[in-house]
């Protein structure tokens, strides 16, 4: 592989930087029940790598709610859920994953490296989660579930925001996506971006390896394998 120095690094949140405890899924289900009168198969459903609006749509169409009704009420679910997070979420609901702060600190200090988010969370939910560990300071911009329900469409949004935030243009070839799911790998691949998959989420390392991700890491502590800019 050619020597790769990432100029723009886009981080997923859940399973990559932190993990949410059971109350988060409970609140998601409770918001669905408040708005649609049911939560569908919330306990059996995989959230991994999906956007918040996608999860709502999948669960409610699985429960037989007509598509026009799902879309009409989506903003209401978003409001109920995000209010819950804002009012109730505490650090006790979250787990910070290994070496996240040291890696982000090092990258934040590296010249010519720009950090952003690429996450399926609605932005205010993302900010609530990150604020539990004071991580918002590393991410002035990002692409979120508010922007697109299909994660595959988020990388161009992130590139645009990165350019606007830093007054320089970024290309897909100098961009690295860091995420924990098959969908993180797929969305990077769809745009010719490098991708590092971390096995700290909900997808086994062997499955991540089978995707052909450029790097598969046990956790972010191994990130120096990508480039010395990540430190060791
Ligand atoms: Mg994730």
Image: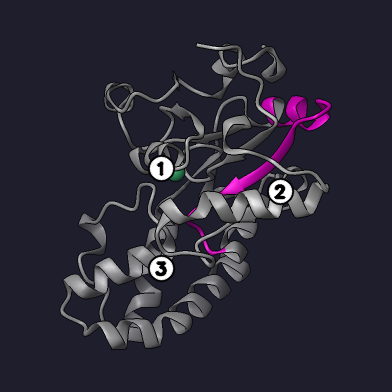
Q: Position of residue 97 (x, y in %)?
A: 54, 32
- Mark 3 secondary-structure assignment: helix
State the residue position of label 3.
Answer: 53
> Which residue sits at x=66%, y=20%?
5
Q: Position of residue 12 (x, y in %)?
A: 53, 43
Disc 2 or 3, which lies upstream in sequence?
3
Q: Nearer the viewer, residue 176 or 108?
A: 176
Residues shaded magenta: 103-122
State the residue position of label 2.
Answer: 162
Q: Position of residue 99 (x, y in %)?
A: 62, 25
Q: How many marks?
A: 3
Q: Residues within 10 Å of mark 3 (few under 14, many from 20)?
A: many
> Which residue sits at x=30%, y=88%?
69
Q: Are marks 3 and 1 in contact (CB under 8 Å)?
A: no
Q: Nearer the viewer, residue 51 or 127?
A: 51
> Which residue sits at x=31%, y=82%?
70
Residue 231 picture quarter: top right
Ligand 1's quadrant: top left
User: Residue 124: within the magenta?
Assistant: no
Q: Residues within 10 Å of mark 2 (few under 14, many from 20)?
A: many
- Mark 1 secondary-structure assignment: loop
- Placement of the C terminus among the 4 image quadrants: top right
229 vs 156, left or right, is right
The disc at residue 190 is 1
206 vs 221, left or right, is left
> Which residue sits at x=42%, y=58%?
51
Give the label, 2 or 3, closer to the camera: 2
Disc 3 or 1, which lies upstream in sequence?
3
Disc 2 or 1, which lies upstream in sequence?
2
Q: CA distance from mark 2 to mark 1?
A: 19 Å
């Amino acid at each position: 592989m050619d020597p790769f120095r990432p100029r723009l690094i886009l981080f997923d949140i859940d399973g990559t930087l932190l993990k949410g405890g059971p109350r988060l899924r409970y609140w998601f289900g409770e918001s669905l029940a408040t708005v649609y009168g049911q939560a569908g198969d919330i306990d059996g459903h995989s959230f991994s790598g999906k956007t918040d609006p996608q999860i709502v749509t999948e669960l409610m169409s699985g429960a037989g709610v007509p598509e026009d009704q799902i879309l009409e009420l989506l903003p209401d679910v978003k409001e109920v859920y995000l209010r819950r997070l804002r009012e109730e979420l505490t650090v006790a609901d979250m787990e910070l994953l290994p070496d996240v702060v040291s890696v982000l600190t090092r990258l934040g200090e590296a010249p010519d490296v720009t950090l952003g988010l690429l996450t399926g969370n609605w932005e205010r939910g993302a900010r609530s989660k990150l604020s539990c560990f004071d991580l918002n300071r590393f991410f002035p911009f990002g692409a979120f579930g508010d922007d697109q329900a299909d994660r595959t469409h988020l990388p161009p949004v992130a590139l645009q925001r990165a350019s606007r935030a830093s007054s320089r243009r970024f290309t897909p070839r100098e961009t690295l996506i860091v995420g924990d799911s098959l969908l993180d790998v797929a969305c990077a691949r769809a745009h010719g971006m490098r991708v590092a998959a971390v096995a700290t989420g909900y997808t086994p390392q062997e499955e991540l390896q089978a995707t052909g991700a450029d790097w598969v890491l046990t956790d972010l502590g191994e990130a120096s394998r990508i480039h010395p800019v990540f430190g060791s």
